[in-house]
């Protein structure tokens, strides 16, 4: 019916144009004294007058009449246009198209109304625009396309047009979404060297499991399939199958459009071994330096990853010497008789160039200097690819931008110059965080945070943090200027108030209250290393109450219930992990020390931590964490009991109650110690059914640790150990760690807690 109506409407329009043209041709030329427009409701008369090819005082002709009709139809605002004459007055009679008064949706759950409104605006349809049936058809197809991108192939869209007053219409898009299409089967045909199961492990798409509602790994999309085909190709090419190719892929959909089968046809070819690697071309008389970057290993199977790594390393090294447009090609001389391949690395450095200008675009809030001060590539200096890459990473680590790109553009007429164009897309940097956490030690706790990472576009950071817990409560106000000096020395000012009850197992209402302020400077030594220097002013008060441990009373009786300290802080950190939340490779180290020489508390305290992440494969990671702490009293005084280390539970030796390892006082309270060590080993795997999703992973662990009191002899007798399994989830509240641990080395009287979890911890 709709097609029939469209055909009749087209015929009617053509007839109208023909009749109007005949009418225009039937008029003898005359001088126009006035022009009158009839039929307008919403369109301004000026819109019509500006489109007419004839003006008052000009001569009207048949050609101008036909041109006027074409021009007015071309506006897209009128469904009918006629020209009439009344003496020497030209009368323009129009019938306006209906306009869209309102656009609404019904039945949509996958997308919000706002998202669908944006889709229609991009298609040219919105409230206030002329109604056009062809535009409605295009809008329906665009809405369907959005649902297809979400694997909802059965989605249907029907439009209801409701006329209203003043020649307007309301549009309602009735959407039947259906269910997302699921992958019922994946078949790989033509494989011989590797099993189908091994090849399917390389794919992110799968037929689903009990966690598919979370990972959506069984929802088909063409983009996901293309990525999996590239992963499959990379798998074979990295194992010597130089002639591997994917012959075809068939995606068959069930009649209900809710089930899909995928078939991948491959040809493996023969396995090739690298017979040798040679260099040809111009290597700037630095052949030995380039040869040291060759990752291709003769005598082993051809590995496309090694070839790509080598060519990239060569290109980057050329870039480091200013050759921004160097060409490096890996040519393969294949001996198919003996299944061997010789790799020839052909290089042409081209012309050396320098950077003329660095142009920053897209920053509407952040000041240019905040971005430019992170750059290690300078204007009027030789182009250096390593410095440009480092500059990009430094700008990206600011965390102010959702998108960041650096491209080089040749300067017209200057072949030895390039401009660097830095394109950024800003994101909101202020946030209010309200959350709740639960741990087996702290029970229920609430957190509130108010932060501005880029205050007034200056790059300075302001923070207010509040944490409530059963035993630990904290209020911290902090301000950081990352470029307190032009050399990148940062300055942080902290004011804090903390209440603690370390010996929670004793009950009672005693507390340890610490209030103070600190000033800390961070001095960058290298791009990965930072040294921290600072000083705090603290007042620690032992607030007596019921069941106060004897260790507190003894310290208070000797040195008073209030202690003033002015500890100096010295620290160093180095972070080369690939991710702070879900690392798979890299190392993190931190060394922090406190030295109290002024005030009531005289002591020295140091803590060193190292984490190492070793990728075993795409799915598996070996993670190691080691921590050593040491403290000692100075000036003849004992180490302050409220500065003790604690061990046991999450963050140290799992399977034992939190902070229950080590020495006790005469009341049986766990008083911590002055020396400790912890070693954690984790084997991290994908969660069953979650595919390769790194936000949800399982791990098996072995923990070893010990805690020693002041003056206590260090022996292996105090060592505790445990083993178990756990779950790591990057949840909306932060990293969640859940562990079930069983002690494998314990002592009589140790408190066991097999099930433990906490929000916001690692290891």
Image (spheres, rainbow, N blue to C red):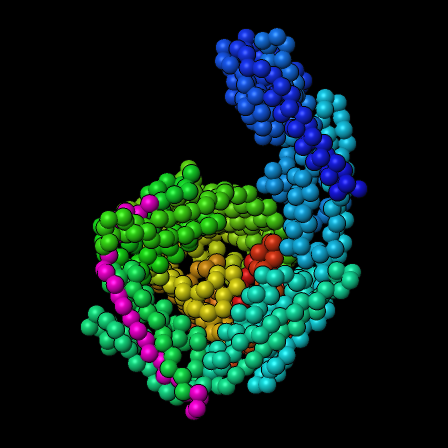
Report x, y in % for residue 583. Answer: 49, 66
Q: Specify whether residue 416 is painted magenta.
A: no
Q: Is residue 361 visible to us here?
A: yes
In terms of secondary structure, what is the magenta stretch mainly? strand
Report x, y in % for residue 155. Answer: 73, 52
- Quarter-of-image position of residue 113: top right
Q: Is residue 654 visible to us here?
A: no
Q: Is residue 86 above or below residue 39?
A: above
Q: Is residue 653 above or below residue 410?
A: below
Q: Closer to the camera, 226 or 335?
A: 335
The residue located at (56%, 74%) in the rendering is: 246
Q: Is residue 467 above or below residue 80?
A: below
Report x, y in % for residue 748. Answer: 62, 78
Report x, y in % for residue 421. Answer: 35, 48
Q: Is residue 726 above or below residue 549?
A: below
Q: Is residue 102 left or right of residue 25?
A: right
The residue located at (48%, 61%) in the rendering is: 580
The residue located at (64%, 16%) in the rendering is: 84
Which span is picked out in magenta? 336-359
Q: How many marks?
A: 0
Which residue reaches farthest bottom? 338
């Amino acid at each position: 019916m709709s097609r029939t109506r469209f055909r009749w409407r087209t015929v009617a329009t053509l007839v109208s144009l023909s009749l109007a043209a005949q009418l225009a041709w039937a008029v003898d030329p005359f001088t126009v004294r006035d022009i009158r427009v009839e039929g307008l409701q919403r369109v301004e008369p000026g819109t019509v007058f500006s489109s007419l090819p004839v003006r008052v005082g000009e001569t009207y002709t048949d050609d101008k009449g036909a041109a006027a009709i074409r021009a007015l139809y071309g506006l897209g605002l009128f469904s009918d246009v006629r020209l009439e004459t009344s003496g020497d007055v030209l009368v323009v009679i129009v019938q306006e198209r209906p306009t869209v008064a309102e656009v609404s949706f019904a039945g949509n759950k996958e997308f919000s109304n706002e998202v669908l409104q944006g889709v229609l605006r991009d298609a040219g349809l919105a409230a206030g625009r002329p109604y056009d049936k062809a535009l409605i058809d295009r809008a329906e197809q665009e809405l369907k396309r959005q649902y297809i991108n979400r694997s909802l192939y059965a989605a249907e869209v029907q439009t209801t047009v409701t006329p209203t007053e003043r020649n307007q219409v309301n549009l309602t898009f009735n959407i039947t979404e259906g269910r997302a299409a699921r992958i019922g089967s994946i078949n790989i045909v033509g494989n011989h060297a590797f099993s189908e199961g091994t090849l399917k492990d390389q794919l992110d798409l799968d037929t689903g499991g009990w966690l598919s509602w979370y990972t959506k790994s069984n929802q088909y999309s063409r983009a996901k399939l293309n990525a999996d085909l590239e992963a499959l190709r990379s798998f074979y090419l990295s194992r010597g199958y130089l002639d591997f190719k994917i012959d075809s892929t068939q995606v068959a959909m069930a009649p209900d459009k809710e089930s899909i089968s995928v078939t991948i046809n491959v040809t493996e070819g023969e396995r090739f071994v690298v017979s040798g690697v040679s260099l040809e071309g111009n290597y700037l008389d630095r052949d030995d330096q380039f040869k040291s970057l060759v990752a291709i290993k003769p005598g082993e199977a051809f590995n496309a990853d090694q070839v790509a790594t080598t060519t990239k390393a060569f290109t980057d090294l050329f870039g480091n010497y200013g050759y921004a447009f160097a060409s490096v090609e890996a040519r393969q001389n294949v001996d198919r008789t003996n299944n061997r391949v010789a790799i020839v690395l052909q290089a042409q450095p081209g012309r050396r160039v320098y950077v003329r200008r660095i142009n920053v675009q897209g920053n509407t809030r952040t000041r240019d200097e905040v971005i430019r001060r992170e750059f290690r590539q300078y204007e009027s200096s030789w182009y250096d690819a390593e410095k440009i890459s480092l500059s990009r990473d430094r700008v990206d680590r600011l965390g102010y931008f959702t998108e960041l790109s650096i491209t080089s553009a040749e300067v017209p007429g200057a072949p030895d110059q390039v401009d660097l164009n830095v394109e950024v897309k800003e994101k909101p940097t202020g946030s209010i965080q309200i959350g709740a956490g639960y741990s087996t030690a702290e029970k229920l706790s609430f957190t509130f945070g108010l932060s501005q990472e880029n205050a007034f576009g200056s790059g300075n950071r302001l923070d207010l943090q509040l944490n409530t817990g059963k035993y630990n409560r904290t209020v911290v106000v902090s301000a950081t200027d990352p470029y307190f000096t032009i050399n990148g020395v940062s300055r942080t000012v902290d004011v804090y108030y903390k209440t603690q009850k370390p010996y929670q197992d004793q009950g009672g209402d005693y507390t340890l209250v610490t209030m103070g302020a600190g000033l800390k400077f961070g001095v960058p030594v290298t791009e990965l290393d930072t040294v921290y220097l600072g000083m705090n002013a603290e007042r620690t008060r032992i607030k007596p109450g019921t069941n106060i441990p004897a260790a507190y009373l003894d310290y208070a009786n000797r040195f008073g219930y209030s202690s003033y300290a002015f500890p100096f802080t010295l620290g160093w950190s180095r972070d080369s992990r690939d991710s702070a939340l879900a690392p798979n490779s890299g190392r993190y180290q931190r060394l922090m020390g406190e030295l109290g020489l002024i005030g009531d508390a005289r002591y020295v305290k140091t803590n060193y931590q190292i984490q190492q992440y070793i990728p075993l494969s795409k799915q598996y990671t070996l993670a190691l964490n080691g921590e050593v702490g040491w403290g000692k009293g100075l000036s003849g005084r004992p180490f302050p009991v409220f500065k003790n280390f604690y061990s046991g539970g999450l963050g140290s030796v799992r399977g034992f109650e939190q902070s229950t390892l080590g020495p006790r006082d005469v009341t049986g309270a766990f008083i911590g110690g002055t020396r400790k060590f912890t070693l954690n080993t984790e084997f991290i795997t994908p969660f069953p059914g979650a595919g390769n999703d790194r936000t949800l992973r399982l791990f098996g662990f072995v923990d070893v640790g010990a805690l020693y009191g002041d003056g206590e002899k260090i022996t292996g007798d105090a060592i505790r150990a445990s083993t178990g399994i756990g779950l790591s989830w990057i949840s909306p509240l932060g990293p969640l760690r859940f562990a079930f641990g069983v002690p494998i080395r314990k002592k009589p009287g140790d408190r066991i807690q097999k099930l433990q979890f906490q929000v916001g911890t690692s290891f």
